[in-house]
Image (spheres, helix red, strand yellow):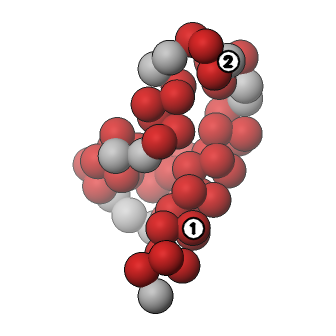
Amino acid sequence: MMLADRLGIDEEQALSTFYSTKTYIQLSDPKYGLQLMSDEYILENILNEIAEYREQMS
């Protein structure tokens, strides 16, 4: 929901975006320790990842 709000997209698009990120992969693997981080920290990781991707595509 936080991702949808920040990006101004619907929940389905936000989930699709989330599941396609490296952050999701790292969140799914305990060795990265992202499960211990706050929702805001994870959201910022995702937003940074999206911004980097958009920069590369420009």
Residue at left offset 63%, top offset 21%: 32
The foreground one among 3 and 29 is 29
58 or 11: which is nearer to us?
58
Apparent side of residue 6 relative to residue 13 in the rendered image (left or right) = right
**Which residue is disc 1 drawn over?**
52
> Which image quadrant for residue 34?
top right
For label 1, the crowd category at 10 Å Cα-Cα, with few meaning under 14, some 14 to 19 and many 20 or more, is: few
Residue at x 56% of width, y 50% of height: 46
Identify the residue at horizontal 53%, vertical 25% (top origin). Answer: 27
- In percent of width and height, residue 52 lies at 57, 67
Q: Amino acid at mark 2?
A: Gly
Residue sitting farthest toward the top? 30
Name the outermost residue toward the bottom: 58
Q: Which residue is mark 2?
A: 33
Callout 2: few (<14), some (14-19), or many (20+) C-alpha neighbours within 10 Å? few
Where residue 15 appears, as percent x and y from the top left, is 34, 43
Q: Is residue 12 left or right of residue 36?
A: left
Q: Residue at x 46, y 20 (%)?
A: 28
> x, y percentage for residue 3?
51, 51
Tag 1: residue type?
Glu
Q: State whether residue 5 is above or below residue 35.
A: below
In the rendered image, the vertical position of residue 12 relative to residue 24, given as above or below: below
User: In the rendering, which numbered label is found on residue 3?
Assistant: none
Give the secondary structure at mark 2: loop
